[in-house]
Amino acid sequence: MGMQNSGWRSAGARLVEDLSNIWPLSGGAPISRASLLGTASPSAAQAQFGGMNQIISGPRVGPIKSNGGAITITGTGSIAGGPDGVDAVTQSITKLTNRGAINGAAGGVSAAGGLGVSNFQTIGALINKGLIDGGAGGAGGIKGGAGGAGVSNAQGATIKSLINSAGGTIIGGAGGSGGKTGGAGGDGVSNAGTITSLSNSGKISGGNGGNGATNGGAGGSGLSNVGTIKSLMNRGTISGGAGQVGGAGVSNASGATIGVLRNATGATIEGGAASQPAFSETGGAGVANSGTITTLANSGTIQGGNGGRGGFGGRGTFIGIAGVNNYGTIATLTNNGTIQGGNAAPRGFGGGGVQNFGMIATLANSGAITGGVGTLGGWGIQNIGAITTLTNSGAITGGAGGGTGSAFADGGAGVGNTGTIATLTNSGTIAGGAAGVSMGAARACGPSQGQSGS
């Protein structure tokens, strides 16, 4: 018996030894069991191979936090923000796919709403076929809270591919109402980092500004960029939210860069309308640029937001192709679609089709660039900065003037220049807008000249 026990113990010892050192199939040094167990820990496994995939197929309370793997929200799945819907704060997301709903939570008293998706790391691909929205700002006795962004990409973070498919919606939260000042609407997509490729075939929209007795909140931008976007392709609708100052469809801030912005045939980029009952309401720009855009190519519609009572129609584009308001630099702006300035309410001024206070190296139009309608019509192209080459084979037209309650009415110029245009070549049409008849005066001015200034 003793021999048998000794033999059993020896065999057991050999078994333990064999298990503690596992030999590779191809030979070589054994791999210690301790090292294998070390790599089997969750944190080490995620670091080497990515975290476990998370699938949300029913209602969940957020935030759903990334573990380094993929996150999928099915068509029956939904996330109620807590306060955010999905967070990639400490670990990246390989792929985020949404077919259901991701919602930011509403803010408390005067507090900002939560974010739909918040990224501080890297998201390999974000594909939305459902709804992603920021939370509404909380109401306050003095000031309303700001709405949360639908998708927020923080400074230093990266989204390699963002695809908003047909039927998908990304929207910023509405600003909260305030006893004096309303909260600003949230941006549909807010980027302070890097987005390599953004493609939209659905709807991306800024949230509406909140109501305020003294001042209403500004509308959020459909897409706000203070970082870098290498490629932006729009086949759907990108729009700013309504507010005392309407939000821009696409806003590119000072120091920010957009490599290529293309607005396809049938697509729309539009500024938000002015909606607050206050003086000097201003519609938002279709594209507003204070940074750098290398190429802005429009085959669809870029439309400035309509102005409110006593306000100004939104500039068609602060960036460049359809209703352009540019304070920065646009290397090439080509238009074979429509760029339209926003229309104004009575006593207001129509927005310009393209307004340039910065630098445009090349502006080529084979479509239509038109100023907005107002008591004073907007100019088709208004240049206060510098345009190196302006080539027109389409139509550039000032907005019609008219309306009630004003002593005069005048159409806008086709091209108005108080800056520098080095070369202007026209084989199309450049025309001033027609003057309307004012109900408050016996005269009407216009029509404006096709070109003004020198």
Image (cartoon, grey):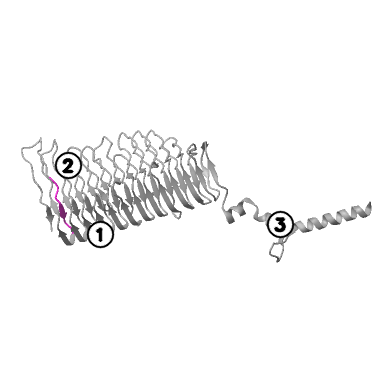
Q: Which residues are magenta?
A: 411-419
Q: Residues within 10 Å of mark 1 (few under 14, many from 20)?
A: many
Earlier in the chain: of badge 3 and badge 2, it is 3
Residue 111 position in % (x across, y down): 43, 38
Disc 3/disc 2 C-alpha distance (Å): 78 Å
Earlier in the chain: of badge 1 and badge 3, it is 3
- Asked whether, in this view, residue 401 is left or right of residue 75, the answer is left
Magenta includes 28? Answer: no
Comparing marks 1 and 3, which lies closer to the viewer? 3
Residue plotted at (25% across, 36% down):
278
Comparing marks 3 and 2, which lies closer to the viewer? 3
Circle 3 residue: 34
Three-letter code for the amino acid on which mark 3 is drawn: Ala
Residue 344 position in % (x across, y down): 20, 40
Q: Quick check: marks 2 and 1 in contact, CB under 8 Å? A: no
Circle 1 residue: 359
Q: Secondary structure at mark 2?
A: loop
